Image (tube, grey):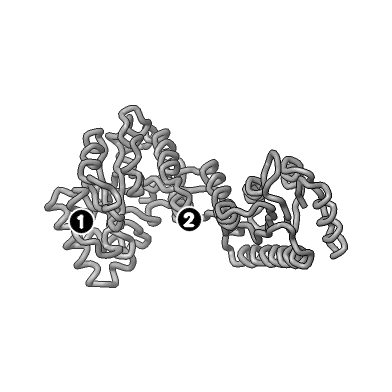
Amino acid sequence: MADDEPALLRAYARLLRQAGYTVEEAVDGNRAAQLVAESDFDAIVSDIDMPGVNGVELLRRVRGRNLDVPVVLITGQPAVDTAVRAVEYGALRYLIKPVDEKVLVSSVGRAVRLHRMARLKRQALSLRGKGAEQPGDLVGLEASLNRALQSLWMAYQPVVSWTGKSLFGFEALLRSSEPALPDPGAVLAAAERLGRLEELGRCIRANVASVVARAPAGCVFVNLHIRDLLDSSLYEESSPLTRVAERVVLEITEHAMLDEVKDVRQCVARLRALGFRIAIDDLGAGYAGLTSFAYLEPDVVKLDMSLVRNVHDHSTKRKLIESMTTLCREMGMQVVAEGVEALEERDALIECGCDLLQGHLFAKPARPFPDVDW
């Protein structure tokens, strides 16, 4: 319980103790932050307007170490923007002074029960093999993204030329040790929701740039979010990735919303002038018309794994891949088939004229650069 009004703090604490709760008292935000850093609580009740660390900042710090513990905020000066931030950052309740005794006790009781339920849900997720941490509010999400960026690393999966038994390149794949964001899609979604895509993109590119020179052979494919094209650092000649641009292929998914970026053609032209090549990813995952081809004029096209999966058993897929590969070749584009996992898939793709292959059949993503299983 935190409040900088001693009389109120004593009254609230006495009331909650009478209701059967053990209460730690903090006379200001700094003391409350210290207690939160040192101990775990079933629920936290805090005044918003305190010197030092205020209630909203305290909530931020709580979420930095515990995604589940409910926080009840109290204020004597209600304001719409404060209420909005309180809810946005995951406060359970926003109470106005003077707080009715029954309301306070019932709010704390509900908070404690919800915390117990959250713990049970975590246990259930763990039993199912799911990530035990799933952020439910912006502050929790922000803390999770911070940890993800700190633990971010890149796995690399080879792209091979099967007929020549040679290495064409590697794709850099985002990885993180943060359990709350267990896959690349979750990390990207968090960065997008928090308005931190630019920061994520720069972190990825710097990570890749540090190892490109050590790649055994060929090029390195780097995935771009469409909004990365709006980041001025992507076009800087002095940036780490630009220094190795001759060995980098920048991938943009076929169904990216290209209209989010003005003058996409000009952006792509600037990247090519720096030495980068451009690839369209996920071709065949959905119909995107001719926009991506017209705007990006790719050097490389990557067939989505939904087309590749069990291609040997589907004549329609084989015809599509053969036609796509032929057309791309006529337009001067190289074709990579992603997600190859079976010998039968490999052989069917070769028969369709697709020589560049990527998938677990050859190597699983690893760091720094895995050997190819021929």
Residue located at (72% from left, 52% from top): 46
Residue located at (53% from left, 48% from top): 145
C-alpha separation, residue under disc 2 versus residue under disc 1: 27 Å
Q: Secondary structure at mark 2?
A: helix
User: Of the residues shown, which amino acid type is indicated by label 1?
Assistant: Thr
Residue located at (73% from left, 40% from top): 30
Q: Relative to 275, is 40 on the left or the right?
A: right
Q: Is residue 238 above or below residue 294?
A: above
User: Would you say the residues marked 2 and 1 are in contact, meaning their CB atoms lie under 8 Å apart?
Assistant: no
Give the camera-side residue of 373 and 62: 62
Residue marked by disc 2 = 186
Residue marked by disc 1 = 291
Q: Position of residue 198 (x, y in %)?
A: 41, 42
Q: Position of residue 268 (x, y in %)?
A: 23, 42
Q: Is residue 191 visible?
A: yes
Residue located at (52% from left, 55% from top): 182
User: Of the residues shown, which amino acid type is indicated by label 2?
Assistant: Ala
Residue at the extreme top: 238
Q: Relative to 79, is 361 on the left or the right?
A: left
Q: Position of residue 44 (x, y in %)?
A: 73, 55
Q: Relative to 78, is 349 on the left or the right?
A: left
Q: Position of residue 71 (x, y in %)?
A: 68, 56
Query: Callout 2 environment at 10 Å: few (<14), some (14 to 19), or many (20+)?
Result: few
Q: Is residue 125 above or below residue 242?
A: below
Q: Relative to 100, is 62 on the left or the right?
A: left
Q: Is residue 277 above or below residue 290?
A: above
Q: Earlier in the sequence, mark 2 or mark 1?
A: 2
Q: Is residue 179 visible?
A: no
